[in-house]
Amino acid sequence: MTGTLRRGLGAAFLAATLCSGAGAQPETGPSLRIMEFSELLDWDLDNHVEALRVFRETCMDMEGADWQSLCALAQNADDSGARAFFELFFRPVLIEDGKDGLFTGYFEPELNGSRHRTNRYRYPVYRMPPEARATSLWLSRRDILSTDVLKGRGLEIAWVEDPVELFFLQIQGSGRIRLQDGSTIRVGYGGANGHPYRSIGQELVRRGIYSLHQVSAGVIRNWVRRNPEPGAELLMHNPSYVFFREVNRVAANRGPLGAMNRSITPMRSIAVDPAYTPLGAPVWIEKNGQSKMRRLMIAQDTGSAIKGAQRADIFFGAGDEAGRKAGQLKDPGRLMVLMPIQRAYAMLPDDL
């Protein structure tokens, strides 16, 4: 659930909202084509060792005897044979549902903060109150921030210095808070108020302030900061409000938890639509655009905005630079899911 909502909100902002659950079956059957590895652009140029190592991180949690057998082989495989491992036991499957391929990006934000409220750090990062957890629809963002409903209850995990960055932290659903003593708190998705996400990027386009191609995370940040009062009101356009929890079991040098409840890896983990792509499966991506990317990724995350057979969200890592790159990504391309051989052929229609 953590990864699902995080990717849903992050991708909804960085993709559809600048222009969504898991497991639902497509209304019409997709078209399938089993491909040869020789058809994958630049397949031989990738670092298959990196992909194999990331595959090992989550394959033990996959369902199916074939996946479990391949996972056992992967755990014992020599890294030098990584490419041969994928070519020997998998077949690339192109799954299409009539929609064009779209790649976006997401990241783990890093904010400055404090365990205690100060004049500089004034904006609280809240745990979820029990009354919000007990209902599917609670107070809106405006109701939460304009009243004292959460104040004085010990629900604050930390305080941060920038309400705009806190808003973006809620969109991503997880992140790190750097404290004044140099230590770090990692926070993850802890629940939400049940209101649907509404894009402030789309709202700026609707108002005629920007055109669709101009809107990015950085543009929105700058506009809100240049226009404090209308900017604060713009943030209220999104009634969804995300609560957090401290994540203590993930080492500081590891990525945040994805939908498989394990750490994800920058530039090797992607969020996908599990109606088409099994979580944990290797996925070959061919991203076009200004900066082409041909890479074997592992599907370890999901999101309500990641809908369709040819839709993926690439994890860029943590921090401002990762956020800048993720926020700029909105490129076409295609992806192929690597399936165990027998499973791949079993997916084909009977009349083929």
Image (cartoon, grey):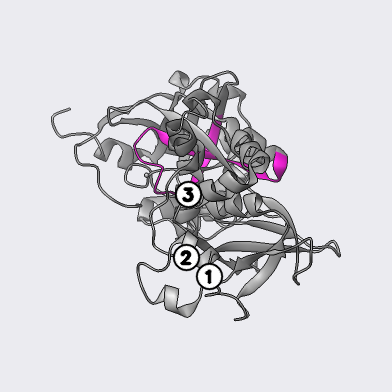
* Figure quadrant of residue 91: top left
Q: Which residues are magenta?
A: 295-320
Rate crowding at label 3 as few (under 14), some (14 to 19) or many (20 or more) other CA atoms within 10 Å.
many
Q: Residue at x 39, y 48 (%)?
A: 304
Furthest-front residue in this view: 229
Residue 48 shows in the view: no
> Is 158 on the left or on the right of 14, as rendered?
right
Is residue 309 part of the magenta span, yes or no? yes
Q: CA distance from mark 2 to mark 1?
A: 6 Å
Measure the C-alpha gap from mark 3 to mark 2.
20 Å
Q: Amino acid at mark 3?
A: Leu
Q: Mark 1 sits on what residue? A: 147
Tell me whether circle 2 and circle 1 mark residues in contact (CB < 8 Å): yes
Residue 250 drawn at (x, y percent): 66, 63
Is residue 251 or residue 232 the one in the foreground? 232
| Left-right relation of 285 to 352 | right
Check disc 2 and report its element: helix, strand or loop: helix
Based on the picture, tell me whether residue 21 belongs to the magenta stretch.
no
Please state which amino acid type lies under the numbered disc 2: Asp
| Residue that appears at 39% across and 40% down | 339
Q: Which residue is mark 3?
A: 9
Amino acid type at circle 1 is: Thr
**Percent position of residue 338, x then y:** 42, 37
- Counting from the top left corner in percent of width and height, residue 52 is at 58, 43
Q: Is residue 335 visible?
A: yes
Q: Residue at x 35, y 55 (%)?
A: 64
Mark 2: few/some/many CA within 10 Å (<14, 14-19, 20+): few
Q: Quadrant of the C terminus?
A: top left
Could you say which is closer to the camera, residue 89 or residue 109? 109
Q: Which residue is mark 2?
A: 143
